[in-house]
Image: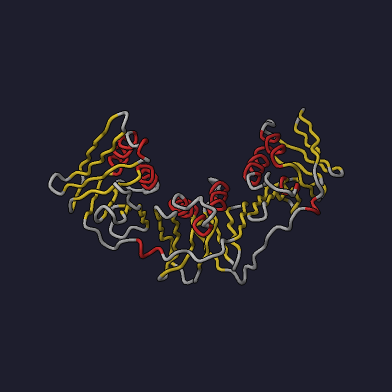
């Protein structure tokens, strides 16, 4: 193999793909990145056998071929090269890299040992075309509530499913829940995509990408964004019937400016670190305020009020970090917040008639 590429394109592709290469494996080949000519382009790929990431970049091909090389070394080496043309040449199991006065020989492994990259039969798969903006927003709004607990693998992903003619994304860790209505669909889909895979897709979407193509078969999902492609195994199992956890109506309904809600939550959070982030939210129908109270046993206590449109009076105790994370992914100037009593779930969304996003936080014992 012999070719030349630009340092900028090669470095960007290596940094994206290299994150998938696994250093915690008994298979040395999985520590490596695959370089392979593909027509007039260079294919750059890595896999940990659960997720495969590929990038195609333009190249001037002199001689076709392939090799695998250590991901960490080549990524860091190329990122430190000056901008300009990088020459790549394979001799045996060695990759010769040169750029101006910089020259290096990297020991590789023959590509014959590299796992076959996964494929999906497009004629049999369920496909969606989603704008990059909607995709990034929907995934960001749901992955924050997925679980890190490997003992319950079905909760470590985001549930993609169709319901009443729409495509939804949902995730929960048992303490909070997020649901995002994404788009209309006639297809039937029910699949749990690992959160780690979705995070890789988000990192792979460049500013020039306007649309993300999503393809599901029975056991895999493929995301294509421009010249980047992520293929992932799906998580086996049935996602919980979460819709019963979202209350249709609430006794206490609040509409409040987002910046005010964020400010009083951040301030209350400063005094709640010793109590596991516990803050008590109180709504007052007569005073038309939302009040947050928190106590730090050694430092003191805090009460912060903000004006709000309020129906009902009562209080609920929530985790301030969960509250801030919810507010951080909701767009718009005004927030809708509702709950019924101290033990019922609270719901946060944009203050509009038919919000496409709902975020549920379970109360703490006060």
Judged left or right of residue 73, residue 236 is left
Q: Residue 64 in the image: state x and y as whole percent.
A: 81, 50
Q: Residue 359 in the image: state x and y as whole percent.
A: 36, 54
Nearer to the camera, 246 or 148: 148
Judged left or right of residue 253, residue 55 is right
Q: Residue 78 in the image: state x and y as whole percent.
A: 70, 36
- Identify the image's colour scheme: rainbow, by chain, secondary structure or one colour: secondary structure
Q: Quadrant of residue 287?
A: top left
Nearer to the camera, 103 or 176: 176
On screen, residue 73 above or below 217: above
On screen, residue 145 above or below 82: below
Nearer to the camera, 237 or 211: 237
Name the residue at the right extreme. Answer: 92
Total count of labels: 0
Residue at 62% over, 67% down: 122
On screen, residue 212 above or below 78: below
Q: Quadrant of residue 244?
A: bottom left
Judged left or right of residue 352, residue 112 is right
Q: Residue 22 in the image: state x and y as whole percent.
A: 67, 46
């Amino acid at each position: 193999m012999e070719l030349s590429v630009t340092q900028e394109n090669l470095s960007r592709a290596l940094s994206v793909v290299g994150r998938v290469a696994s250093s915690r494996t008994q298979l040395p080949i999985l520590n490596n990145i695959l370089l392979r000519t593909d027509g007039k382009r260079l294919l750059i790929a890595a896999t940990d056998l659960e997720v495969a990431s590929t990038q195609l970049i333009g190249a001037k091909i002199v001689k076709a071929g392939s090799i695998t090389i250590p991901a960490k070394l080549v990524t860091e080496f190329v990122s430190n090269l000056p901008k300009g043309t990088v020459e790549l040449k394979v001799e045996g199991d060695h990759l010769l890299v040169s750029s101006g006065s910089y020259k290096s020989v990297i020991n590789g492994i023959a590509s014959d040992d590299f796992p076959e990259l996964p494929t999906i039969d497009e004629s049999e798969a369920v496909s969606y075309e989603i704008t990059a903006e909607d995709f990034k927003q929907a995934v960001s709004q749901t992955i924050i509530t997925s679980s890190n607990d490997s003992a319950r693998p079905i909760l470590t992903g985001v549930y993609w499913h169709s319901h009443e003619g729409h495509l939804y994304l949902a995730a929960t860790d048992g303490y909070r829940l997020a649901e995002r209505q994404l788009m209309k669909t006639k297809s039937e889909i029910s699949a749990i995509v690992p959160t780690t895979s979705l995070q890789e897709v988000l990192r792979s979407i460049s500013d020039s990408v306007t649309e993300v193509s999503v393809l599901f078969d029975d056991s895999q999902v493929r995301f294509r964004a421009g010249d980047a492609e992520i293929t992932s195994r799906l998580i086996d199992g049935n996602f919980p019937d979460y819709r019963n956890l979202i209350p249709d109506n609430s006794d206490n309904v609040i509409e409040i400016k987002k910046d005010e809600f964020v400010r009083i939550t951040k301030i209350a959070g400063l005094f709640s670190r010793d109590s596991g982030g516990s803050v008590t939210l109180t709504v007052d129908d007569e005073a038309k305020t939302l009040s947050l109270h928190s106590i730090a046993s050694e430092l003191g206590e805090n009460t912060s009020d903000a004006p709000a449109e309020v129906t009902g009076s009562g209080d609920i105790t929530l985790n301030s970090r969960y509250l801030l994370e919810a507010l951080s992914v909701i767009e718009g100037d005004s927030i809708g917040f509702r709950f019924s009593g101290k033990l019922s779930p609270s719901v946060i969304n944009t203050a509009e008639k038919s919000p496409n996003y709902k975020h549920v936080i379970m109360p703490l014992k006060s």
